[in-house]
Image (spheres, grey):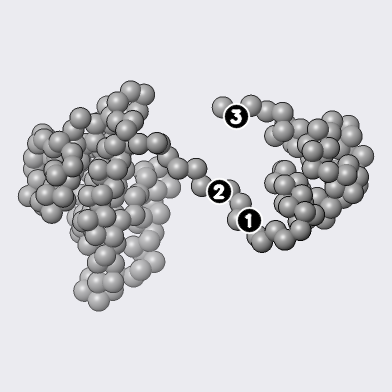
Amino acid sequence: MTIWIDTREAAKHADVLALISEQVETEMRELPADFLISASSPNRPLLVERKTVNNLLLDFSTGHLWTQIRNALRYEEADYCIVLETRDYWSVNRFRNWEKGRVMRIVESIIFDWKIRIIPSYTPEWTAEWLVYKHRELQGTTEGPRAFPLRIRPPLDTLRDKQRYLIEGLPGISAVLAERLLEHFGSPRAVFQASEEALKKVPGIGEKRAREITKVLDGKPT
């Protein structure tokens, strides 16, 4: 499958194009953004606007930024994101006399007001590698998104520490409540198998907390 490059902007992206064309089939066509990454069902194609920080500020100053975003969002056949290369961020104050907070406010507006994903990059090489990887992901030729841990696990030296860590993963359970549950039920397995009524007998575990715990333990993820 293909990564398409906007014919009107191809020269601007010659650096990235040279890097991705060695690994992915590329074609030129007129697009409402810089790149269009094809996808295999059930994934959706992805429109990508590539910008440096200086590009972003220039387009913001002229009002072109919002026109670009509107045009891309009208392209209903694909999702849309912006890849922002930050290597020249240091030059914002020095050459353009922009306040850093104002630059961040523009980025914030794109993310929160326009609901558009901004993918941080650093150099054209980073952008090229991401485009290739994203292409493989949307084609279903990677293992899919990596699952990252939701909690940072501290050093667990004793069995008691390991048991308490398990129980603290339940909703609304602090270290103190985890100790109470262990004392009351004797083991993590007994805690996890306890009914809502049994949980409410532990001091500090009210009706709402007991209901949330059983909901998490019994529910099936969607």
Q: Quarter-wise, where is residue 196 in the image? A: top right
The percent coordinates of residue 135 (x first, y second) are 27, 37
Q: Nearer the viewer, residue 23 or 204?
A: 23
Figure quadrant of the C terminus:
top right
Residue at the far top in the pictured view: 41
Of circles 3 and 2, which is in front?
Answer: 2
Evaluate if marks 1 and 2 touch, with contact meaning CB atoms under 8 Å apart: yes
Q: Is residue 67 visible?
A: no
Q: Residue at x 8, y 43 (%)?
A: 8
Up-down relation of residue 102 to residue 140 (above or below): below
Tell me: 12 left or right of 88: left
Residue bearing mark 3: 221
Q: Which kind of residue does numbered mark 2 sit on?
A: Pro
Residue bearing mark 1: 153
Tell me: 78 left or right of 34: right
Work out whether mark 3 precedes mark 2 in sequence or the reverse, and give the earlier one: 2
Q: Are there few (<14), some (14-19), or many (20+) residues within 10 Å of tag 3?
A: few
The CA span between labels 3 and 1 is 23 Å
Q: Residue at x 15, y 36 (%)?
A: 25
Q: Are there few (<14), some (14-19), or many (20+) residues within 10 Å of tag 1?
A: few
The percent coordinates of residue 78 (x first, y second) are 28, 31
What secondary structure is marked by label 1?
A: loop
Up-down relation of residue 120 to residue 7 (above or below): below
Badge count: 3
Q: Which kind of residue does numbered mark 1 sit on?
A: Arg
The percent coordinates of residue 197 (x first, y second) are 88, 32
Q: What's the mark number on residue 167?
A: none
Q: Residue at x 72, y 43 (%)?
A: 170
Figure quadrant of the N terminus:
top left
Residue bearing mark 2: 149
Work out whether mark 3 precedes mark 1 in sequence or the reverse, and give the earlier one: 1
Up-down relation of residue 93 to residue 86 (above or below): below
